[in-house]
Image: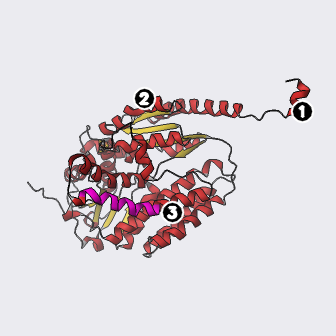
Amino acid sequence: MEMNYPKFTPEMKKTHKMLIPNMAPVQFRILIAAMEQQGYTCELLGNCGSQVAENGLKYVHNDTCYPALLVIGQFLDALESGQYDLDHTALVITQTGGGCRASNYIHLLRKALERAGFGQVPVASLNFSGLERDSGFPMTLLLARQLLAAIYYGDLLVTLRAQTVPYELYRGDADAKLEKWLTVICDLIRAGKGYSSREIRSAMPEIAADFASIPVRRTPKVKVGVVGEIYVKYSPLGNNELEKFLESQNCEVNLPGLMGFVQYCAYNPSETARLYGGNFLEKHVSGLVLSYLAGTERVMIDALKKNGYHAPLPFKELTKLADGVIGHGDKMGEGWLLTAEMIELVRSGYENIVCAQPFGCLPNHICGKGMVNKIRELYPTANITPIDYDPSATRVNQENRIKLMLAVGRERLESRADAAEPEAPVLVREALGV
Ligand code: SF4
């Protein structure tokens, strides 16, 4: 039975303002610039506070996964604020097209809108999988290229900032550079530039070199990786400003890129075809998309390495890290990617890990918390803490658990520093008779 809900039609591009939830603030700012270039008027929602979750709980069943509850709550809270012309406002929700519940959030949102008295507000789906054809963004090749470039630029900026902030000599330098480059990139994208391979090849090394010019003192810090369900991993609303909290604890934070998740989504159809069979397109589409993405990935990795930053592994290498630990067929939620990211982090020195797990998220409890013992068996230095995020979990409780993990990280850092104390020169040792 077809539900009677307002569709987002192409004409609304000119008449409606699109509201977008703030999942990954840096990447999403550039994504919005790409949508503006296509003629849409957009706003990234910044409303937060306890009323967001309360609104979600009011209109969505409390068994629903926490990210859905927050996204829906944030939309309802914005619509209730009186700031928007309800007859000219539309909501944007992303759909991965995977097997998990995220692909169905859109229906929960429409039901919640109806019940809250906003039944006239259309919901548009942003996806690469051909879902919601009658109420989605027409995904043109140009828009897809711009969106992918936006995610890569965002990942680069987040990485550069994260590896600079804890070491900068003058507080605020890295944030100022981030803001500067966000403005430059958004302006370029809005002008219909900056997304071609040639332009990315020229821009990324320049951005990385500019960050590398910030004066820093690289004294060793506790290095913390953050993994988990995609929304609570990135969204400050979902994870109670986890990144900010870790920085306040004098840590270097590594938030693996959003593009890894896009590559994972692109990789999975080939795995499905390998396991269960499929047509020619299903078998080969992943390889084509991944090889297109690998070109920009290489540019980003080179730009980071050449300027003295730690760079993530290429996706192809990352897939191998799951071998023997978890099957690639485990692809609900963040699936094997979550496990592979934890392994990559431990191997590259970010052995302290927060695994952000939302309430109601069975797949990520299996691939996150469920893999901790196995990873510790293989990598004894892994110091992983799964943290639950749900409407009843208190921020203070979450932060106290993270502080316990950080205490272990600090102890190890100090003992390594002691072990690395330079040996006294030979003459001194002779004088001391040692
Ligand atoms: S991955 Fe987890 S949070 Fe996301 S839809 Fe699936 S169960 Fe819900």
Please provide percent x and percent y for residue 108. 22, 49
Question: Which of pointers 3 and 2 lies earlier in the amino acid sequence?
Answer: 3
> Within 8 Å of ligand 1, the CB of disc 3?
no
> Magenta-highlighted stretch: main secondary structure?
helix
Secondary structure at badge 3 equals: helix
Secondary structure at badge 1 equals: helix
In the picture as drawn, the residue positioned furthest to the top comes out as 433
Quadrant of the rendered image containing residue 29: bottom left
Q: Does the image show residue 131?
A: no
Please tell me whether residue 403 is drawn above or below residue 260 in the rendered image.
above
Residue for badge 3: 299
Question: Real-space Cα distance between discs 3 and 1?
Answer: 49 Å
Q: Amino acid at mark 2?
A: Asn
Question: Real-space Cα distance between discs 2 and 1?
Answer: 48 Å
Please provide percent x and percent y for residue 135. 21, 63
Q: Amino acid at mark 1?
A: Leu
Span highlighted in magenta in the image: 282-296
The answer to whether the residues at label 2 and label 1 have Cβ atoms under 8 Å apart is: no
Which label sits on residue 373?
A: 2
